[in-house]
Image (tube, grey):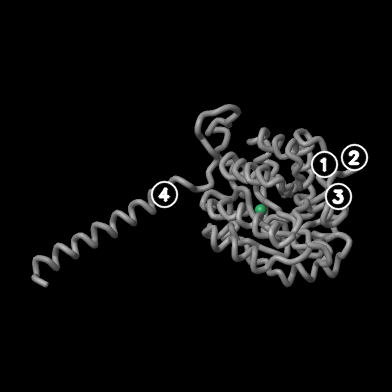
Amino acid sequence: MSKKRTVIVLAAFLFIAFLGAFFSEYELRFVPNKPDLRPGENTPDPKELEGKFELKGGSERDNRGFPQREIVDLVSQFPDLFYRQGPPDEKKVALTFDDGPDSVYTPQILDILREHKVKATFFLIGERVKLFPDVVKRMVKEGHVIGNHTMTHPNIVKLSNKETVKEIRDCENVIKTLAGYRPALFRSPYGSLDPEKVREISKLKVKIIAWNVDSLDWKSLTAEQVKSNILENVKEGSIILQHSSGSEEENLTGSVAALKDIIKTLKKEGYKFVTVPDLLDIPYKKKV
Ligand SMILES: [Zn+2]
């Protein structure tokens, strides 16, 4: 190859690499999990959203690492209070979605669930419930179950008992105004809990719901990765964890894209999709 041709080939290669980098950056910039700020009916004012769309304890990426082993320990220590799966003898599974509502991913998830006639369980953050009330009303109308995921998504083990109780109470009060009930199901942000906090939370007459299949979708995985994390680990009675929103840097596009195939595949394998209270045969509403 002549010197000139080598230079041209090299220049073309660099140009293509530059274009690739530019467009992937471009896409990344346009799909983060920010609240949808496009004007529309009931869209909160951007000023109103500022600071309120944060996860108080930080992103999942910085906080996760609470091992399944500790969840298993808590389940065996508090068998009537702390659950991570349903009965292993029936082909039933429960889809659960944390950290919503938002106006980007949650409505897409609701569309897919409606199309496939699947009811799921959403663990909602109180501050976001206030921002997107219409999305919450839609969940209730379409037959999904709502659980409590605290008011501001703090790391519970770092809070005092008093602060913990306030986080859960505030969230249930906000949910009550829209859903008409106080959730009897609670999921701790980041899954983070210890025996002392479990005892304190039990006084609030809620059951604590963990999971035994983690999609790890908060790592902004591709649809293929989310699918294999779920389908390779699912079994009878599984409680599956996905997110319907997250912190700003979490991209849940892959998780949403995987959902249809996950539902189709599991239905083909004979699984029935139920809500967490149906799977565990426990109430989802508090009596008062
Ligand atoms: Zn969460």
Query: Mark 3 is on which residue type?
Result: Leu
In the image, residue 137 lies at what x, y percent? 71, 34
Q: Position of residue 211 (x, y in %)?
A: 73, 61
Residue nearer the viewer, 59 or 165:
59
Classify mark 1 as within 8 Å of ligand 1 or not, answering yes or no: no
Residue at 68% in and 69% down? 67
Instruction: Mark 1 and mark 2 in contact? Answer it, CB < 8 Å.
Output: yes
Q: Residue at x 75, y 47 (%)?
A: 148
In the current view of this chain or complex, which residue is farthest to the top?
Answer: 41
Q: Which residue is mark 2?
A: 288
Q: Nearer the viewer, mark 3 or mark 1?
A: 1
Using the rendered image of the protein, determine whether residue 130 is visible from the camera's viewpoint. yes
Q: Is residue 5 left or right of residue 162?
A: left
Secondary structure found at label 1: loop
- Kindly identify the amino acid type of the residue bearing the numbered disc 2: Val
Instruction: Measure the C-alpha gap from mark 3 to mark 1.
Output: 11 Å
**In this view of the protein, which residue sits in the foreground, 90 or 7?**
90
Q: What residue sits right under mark 1 in the picture?
A: 182
Disc 4 to disc 3, C-alpha distance: 44 Å
Quarter of the picture containing the N terminus is bottom left
Does residue 201 appear in the picture of this structure?
Answer: no
Give above or below for 197 relative to 248.
Answer: below
Q: Residues within 10 Å of mark 3 (few under 14, many from 20)?
A: some
Q: Residue at label 4?
A: 27
